[in-house]
Protein backbone atom coordinates (compact mmCIF):
# COMPACT_ATOMS: atom_id res chain seq x y z
CA UNK A 1 0.00 0.00 0.00
CA UNK A 2 1.03 3.62 -0.31
CA UNK A 3 0.66 6.37 2.24
CA UNK A 4 -1.94 8.06 0.04
CA UNK A 5 -4.01 4.88 -0.41
CA UNK A 6 -3.97 3.64 3.19
CA UNK A 7 -7.42 3.68 4.80
CA UNK A 8 -6.16 2.85 8.29
CA UNK A 9 -4.40 5.62 10.25
CA UNK A 10 -1.08 4.31 11.52
CA UNK A 11 -1.80 5.42 15.10
CA UNK A 12 -5.26 3.79 15.33
CA UNK A 13 -5.64 0.34 16.97
CA UNK A 14 -7.05 -2.37 14.67
CA UNK A 15 -8.82 -5.67 15.54
CA UNK A 16 -6.55 -8.66 15.98
CA UNK A 17 -8.99 -11.01 14.23
CA UNK A 18 -9.38 -13.30 17.25
CA UNK A 19 -12.54 -14.46 18.99
CA UNK A 20 -12.51 -11.53 21.40
CA UNK A 21 -13.52 -8.36 19.47
CA UNK A 22 -12.23 -6.17 22.30
CA UNK A 23 -8.64 -7.26 21.69
CA UNK A 24 -6.81 -4.86 19.42
CA UNK A 25 -3.23 -4.31 18.31
CA UNK A 26 -1.44 -1.29 16.92
CA UNK A 27 -0.86 -1.37 13.17
CA UNK A 28 2.71 -2.45 12.42
CA UNK A 29 4.45 -1.65 9.15
CA UNK A 30 7.75 -2.66 7.57
CA UNK A 31 9.68 -0.88 4.83
CA UNK A 32 8.01 -3.08 2.18
CA UNK A 33 4.53 -2.01 3.34
CA UNK A 34 5.04 1.68 2.59
CA UNK A 35 5.64 3.46 -0.71
CA UNK A 36 6.49 7.13 -1.08
CA UNK A 37 4.68 8.45 -4.15
CA UNK A 38 6.78 10.65 -6.47
CA UNK A 39 5.55 14.22 -6.65
CA UNK A 40 6.77 17.73 -7.34
CA UNK A 41 8.27 19.54 -4.37
CA UNK A 42 9.26 23.12 -3.62
CA UNK A 43 11.72 21.99 -0.94
CA UNK A 44 15.39 22.55 -1.75
CA UNK A 45 17.35 19.55 -0.39
CA UNK A 46 20.28 21.73 0.68
CA UNK A 47 17.98 23.84 2.87
CA UNK A 48 16.15 20.94 4.51
CA UNK A 49 16.69 20.66 8.27
CA UNK A 50 17.15 17.01 9.24
CA UNK A 51 18.26 17.72 12.80
CA UNK A 52 16.47 15.95 15.62
CA UNK A 53 16.45 16.29 19.40
CA UNK A 54 17.66 12.98 20.88
CA UNK A 55 17.63 14.12 24.52
CA UNK A 56 17.11 17.40 26.30
CA UNK A 57 20.79 18.31 25.79
CA UNK A 58 21.77 16.30 22.69
CA UNK A 59 20.72 17.32 19.20
CA UNK A 60 21.65 15.19 16.17
CA UNK A 61 22.13 16.63 12.71
CA UNK A 62 20.44 13.59 11.16
CA UNK A 63 17.93 11.34 12.98
CA UNK A 64 20.05 8.18 12.86
CA UNK A 65 21.11 6.07 15.85
CA UNK A 66 22.82 2.68 15.62
CA UNK A 67 21.78 -0.17 17.89
CA UNK A 68 23.61 -0.92 21.14
CA UNK A 69 24.34 -4.51 20.08
CA UNK A 70 27.71 -6.25 20.19
CA UNK A 71 27.25 -7.24 16.54
CA UNK A 72 26.49 -3.67 15.48
CA UNK A 73 28.13 -0.84 17.40
CA UNK A 74 31.66 -0.52 18.65
CA UNK A 75 34.08 2.35 18.06
CA UNK A 76 34.26 2.02 14.25
CA UNK A 77 30.47 2.14 13.82
CA UNK A 78 30.16 4.97 16.37
CA UNK A 79 32.76 6.99 14.43
CA UNK A 80 30.93 6.36 11.14
CA UNK A 81 27.59 7.39 12.66
CA UNK A 82 29.07 10.56 14.18
CA UNK A 83 30.65 11.51 10.84
CA UNK A 84 27.23 11.23 9.21
CA UNK A 85 25.65 13.45 11.89
CA UNK A 86 23.99 10.68 13.89
CA UNK A 87 25.04 8.71 16.95
CA UNK A 88 26.30 5.23 17.69
CA UNK A 89 25.35 3.68 21.03
CA UNK A 90 28.14 1.42 22.30
CA UNK A 91 26.97 -1.93 23.67
CA UNK A 92 27.57 -3.01 27.28
CA UNK A 93 28.93 -6.48 26.56
CA UNK A 94 32.43 -5.23 27.40
CA UNK A 95 34.48 -4.67 30.57
CA UNK A 96 34.19 -1.11 31.86
CA UNK A 97 37.81 -0.40 30.96
CA UNK A 98 37.20 -1.48 27.36
CA UNK A 99 34.00 0.58 27.18
CA UNK A 100 36.00 3.63 28.27
CA UNK A 101 38.69 2.83 25.69
CA UNK A 102 36.06 2.58 22.94
CA UNK A 103 34.63 5.98 23.90
CA UNK A 104 38.12 7.48 23.94
CA UNK A 105 38.80 6.11 20.45
CA UNK A 106 35.62 7.76 19.14
CA UNK A 107 36.38 11.07 20.84
CA UNK A 108 39.89 11.15 19.40
CA UNK A 109 38.87 10.21 15.86
CA UNK A 110 38.30 13.79 14.73
CA UNK A 111 37.87 16.96 16.67
CA UNK A 112 39.22 19.79 14.53
CA UNK A 113 42.08 20.26 16.95
CA UNK A 114 42.86 17.44 19.37
CA UNK A 115 43.21 19.20 22.71
CA UNK A 116 44.59 16.17 24.55
CA UNK A 117 46.64 14.29 21.94
CA UNK A 118 48.06 10.84 22.51
CA UNK A 119 51.80 11.20 23.16
CA UNK A 120 54.83 9.05 23.81
CA UNK A 121 58.13 9.59 25.59
CA UNK A 122 61.65 9.40 24.11
CA UNK A 123 62.21 6.15 26.03
CA UNK A 124 59.23 4.31 24.54
CA UNK A 125 60.07 1.59 22.03
CA UNK A 126 58.93 1.54 18.42
CA UNK A 127 56.80 -1.51 19.23
CA UNK A 128 54.95 0.48 21.91
CA UNK A 129 54.40 3.40 19.53
CA UNK A 130 53.13 1.04 16.84
CA UNK A 131 50.64 -0.45 19.31
CA UNK A 132 49.37 3.00 20.33
CA UNK A 133 48.97 4.06 16.70
CA UNK A 134 47.00 0.89 15.97
CA UNK A 135 44.79 1.35 19.01
CA UNK A 136 43.86 4.94 18.25
CA UNK A 137 44.01 4.56 14.45
CA UNK A 138 46.54 7.36 14.03
CA UNK A 139 49.75 7.64 12.03
CA UNK A 140 52.10 9.35 14.46
CA UNK A 141 52.66 10.75 17.94
CA UNK A 142 54.16 13.90 19.44
CA UNK A 143 57.07 13.08 21.75
CA UNK A 144 57.16 14.84 25.12
CA UNK A 145 59.42 14.68 28.16
CA UNK A 146 58.28 14.19 31.75
CA UNK A 147 57.35 17.88 32.07
CA UNK A 148 55.17 17.88 28.94
CA UNK A 149 57.76 19.73 26.86
CA UNK A 150 57.58 18.91 23.15
CA UNK A 151 60.90 17.32 22.17
CA UNK A 152 60.03 15.70 18.85
CA UNK A 153 57.50 13.86 16.74
CA UNK A 154 57.45 10.32 15.37
CA UNK A 155 55.36 9.20 12.39
CA UNK A 156 54.99 6.19 10.13
CA UNK A 157 57.58 7.75 7.84
CA UNK A 158 60.17 7.61 10.64
CA UNK A 159 59.39 3.99 11.49
CA UNK A 160 58.72 2.53 8.05
CA UNK A 161 62.15 1.02 7.41
CA UNK A 162 63.13 0.31 11.01
CA UNK A 163 63.60 -3.42 11.66
CA UNK A 164 64.50 -3.29 15.36
CA UNK A 165 61.19 -2.73 17.16
CA UNK A 166 62.98 -2.47 20.51
CA UNK A 167 64.77 0.69 19.42
CA UNK A 168 63.96 3.79 21.48
CA UNK A 169 61.84 6.58 20.03
CA UNK A 170 64.67 9.06 20.76
CA UNK A 171 66.83 7.34 18.14
CA UNK A 172 64.27 7.58 15.35
CA UNK A 173 62.04 10.60 15.97
CA UNK A 174 62.24 13.94 14.20
CA UNK A 175 63.77 16.09 16.92
CA UNK A 176 62.88 19.63 17.98
CA UNK A 177 62.87 22.37 16.86
CA UNK A 178 59.71 21.53 14.92
CA UNK A 179 57.18 23.55 12.98
CA UNK A 180 54.60 24.43 15.64
CA UNK A 181 51.81 26.92 16.27
CA UNK A 182 50.84 28.83 19.38
CA UNK A 183 47.61 28.28 21.28
CA UNK A 184 44.67 30.11 19.72
CA UNK A 185 45.91 29.76 16.14
CA UNK A 186 43.12 30.14 13.57
CA UNK A 187 42.15 27.33 11.21
CA UNK A 188 43.30 29.42 8.24
CA UNK A 189 46.72 30.08 9.78
CA UNK A 190 47.15 26.43 10.75
CA UNK A 191 46.28 25.27 7.24
CA UNK A 192 48.74 27.81 5.85
CA UNK A 193 51.56 26.39 7.98
CA UNK A 194 50.75 22.83 6.97
CA UNK A 195 50.71 23.78 3.31
CA UNK A 196 53.80 26.00 3.40
CA UNK A 197 56.01 23.48 5.17
CA UNK A 198 54.46 20.40 3.51
CA UNK A 199 53.79 18.66 6.80
CA UNK A 200 50.81 16.59 7.95
CA UNK A 201 50.87 17.27 11.70
CA UNK A 202 51.08 20.63 13.45
CA UNK A 203 51.75 20.51 17.22
CA UNK A 204 50.19 23.32 19.27
CA UNK A 205 52.33 24.63 22.14
CA UNK A 206 51.99 27.23 24.88
CA UNK A 207 54.42 30.04 25.63
CA UNK A 208 56.75 27.62 27.43
CA UNK A 209 56.93 25.06 24.63
CA UNK A 210 54.63 22.56 26.31
CA UNK A 211 52.34 20.56 24.05
CA UNK A 212 48.67 21.55 24.35
CA UNK A 213 47.14 20.25 21.12
CA UNK A 214 47.60 18.81 17.66
CA UNK A 215 46.16 19.71 14.25
CA UNK A 216 46.49 17.40 11.25
CA UNK A 217 45.78 17.68 7.53
CA UNK A 218 43.16 14.95 7.94
CA UNK A 219 41.18 17.21 10.28
CA UNK A 220 40.62 19.67 7.42
CA UNK A 221 39.95 16.95 4.85
CA UNK A 222 37.36 15.26 7.07
CA UNK A 223 35.68 18.57 7.88
CA UNK A 224 35.02 19.03 4.16
CA UNK A 225 34.16 15.38 3.56
CA UNK A 226 31.75 15.09 6.52
CA UNK A 227 30.10 18.52 6.98
CA UNK A 228 27.46 17.08 9.35
CA UNK A 229 30.03 15.41 11.59
CA UNK A 230 29.41 15.54 15.34
CA UNK A 231 33.00 14.64 16.32
Image (spheres, grey):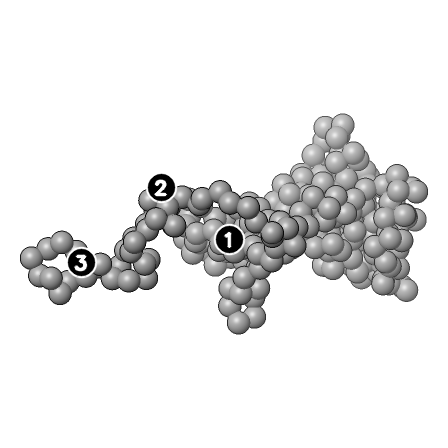
For disc 1, the marked residue is 64
Cβ atoms under marks 2 and 3 closer than 8 Å: no
Residue 91 coordinates in the image, percent (x, y)? 44, 54
Mark 1 vs mark 3, CA separation in Å:
32 Å
For disc 3, the marked residue is: 15
Give the residue at x 67% y 47%: 226
Return the residue found at the far front: 40
User: Which residue is found at the position 91% from the left and 41% from the top?
Assistant: 197
Looking at the picture, does residue 60 appear above or below residue 56? above
Q: Position of residue 46 (x, y in %)?
A: 66, 50
Front disc: 1 or 3: 3
Q: Residue furthest bottom?
A: 56
Report whether 227 appears left or right of 153.
Answer: left
Is the residue marked by circle 3 packed among few (<14), some (14-19), or many (20+) residues within 10 Å? few
Q: Do the residues under discs 1 and 2 have CB atoms within 8 angstroms?
A: no
Find residue 32 and name its label.
Answer: 2
Instruction: Please identify the quarter of the rendering in which residue 145 is found.
Output: bottom right
SS of the residue under disc 1: loop
Disc 1 or disc 2, which is closer to the eye?
A: 2
Image quarter (top left, top right, bottom left or bottom right) of the C terminus: bottom right
- Label located before the other in sequence (2 or 3): 3
Circle 1 packing at 10 Å, graded few (<14), some (14-19), many (20+), is: some
Quadrant for residue 13, please give it. Answer: bottom left
Residue 202 in the image: state x and y as whole percent. 83, 49
Return the residue nearer the eye: 219 or 96: 219
The first of marks 1 and 3 along the sequence is 3
Q: Which of 195 and 5 lies nearest the eye of the viewer? A: 5
Q: Residues within 10 Å of mark 2 (few under 14, many from 20)?
A: few
Disc 2, SS: helix
For the N terminus, which image quadrant?
top left
> Would residue 19 be seen by someone viewing this image from the given angle?
yes
Amino acid sequence: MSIAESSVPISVPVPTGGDDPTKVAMLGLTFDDVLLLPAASDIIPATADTSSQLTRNIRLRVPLVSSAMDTVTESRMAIAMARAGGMGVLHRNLPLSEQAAQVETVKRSEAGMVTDPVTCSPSNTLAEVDAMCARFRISGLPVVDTSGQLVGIITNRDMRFEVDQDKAVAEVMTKAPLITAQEGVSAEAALGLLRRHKIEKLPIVDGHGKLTGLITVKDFVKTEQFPLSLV
